[in-house]
Image: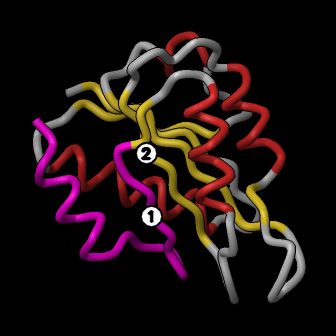
Amino acid sequence: MNIAIVYESSTGTTATAAQAMGKEFTQLGHQCQVQSVAKADPVEVAKADLVCIGAWVQGMLIFGQHPSEGALKFILRLGNLAGKRTLVFCTYKIAAGSTLSQMAKALETQGAVVAAQFQFRGHHPDAKFTQFAQTLR
């Protein structure tokens, strides 16, 4: 399976999580490309079998959380994603709030199917991500 992971990272935490996800997908036999929103080509990303979009959480410590602006803008640049399988993830320090649901809604508005949502408090994907990755064919 061809997997594209695109992320926006402020401090490096989201970038590290994206790289760890890519490593895990690759170890399971998938082709995976990991890029920042600044470098990724939306047309090429949209061609992947699975598109993963990651963001760091912006907002106040315990309220008003939302996805980073760069991640949301990149989602809009992807264009029509009719039926495209996608995954959203975020990294956070205190709380993620509605970050994932906002990202999922943006993708669904463009026709994508959001297959999974993950929030990581730190640099590394968790066991739930590993279980999801193992189900991909």
Disc 2 residue type (three-letter): Leu
- Name which residue lies at 58% across and 34% down: 107
When the figure is inspected, residue 32 is found, relative to residue 21, above or below; the finding is above
Q: Is residue 71 above or below residue 24?
A: above
Occupied quadrant, residue 105: top right
Closest to the observer, 137 or 102: 102
Choose the circle earlier in sequence order: 2 or 1.
2
**Residue 25 place in picture, x, y as percent:** 24, 47
Q: Quadrant of the C terminus?
A: top left
Q: Amino acid at mark 1?
A: Phe
Residue bearing the label numbered 1: 118
Measured from the top left, where is residue 134 in percent x and y?
12, 54
- Residue shown at the point (59%, 59%) measured from the top left: 100
SS of the residue under disc 1: strand
Rendered image quadrant of residue 66: bottom right
Identified at 22% across, 57% down, the residue is 132
Residue span colored magenta: 115-137
Q: How many numbered markers are drawn?
A: 2
The answer to whether marks 2 and 1 mark residues whose Cβ atoms lie closer than 8 Å is: yes
Q: Which residue is mark 2?
A: 87
Residue 34 x, y percent position in the rendering: 47, 39
Horizontally, is 41 left or right of 68 in the view? left
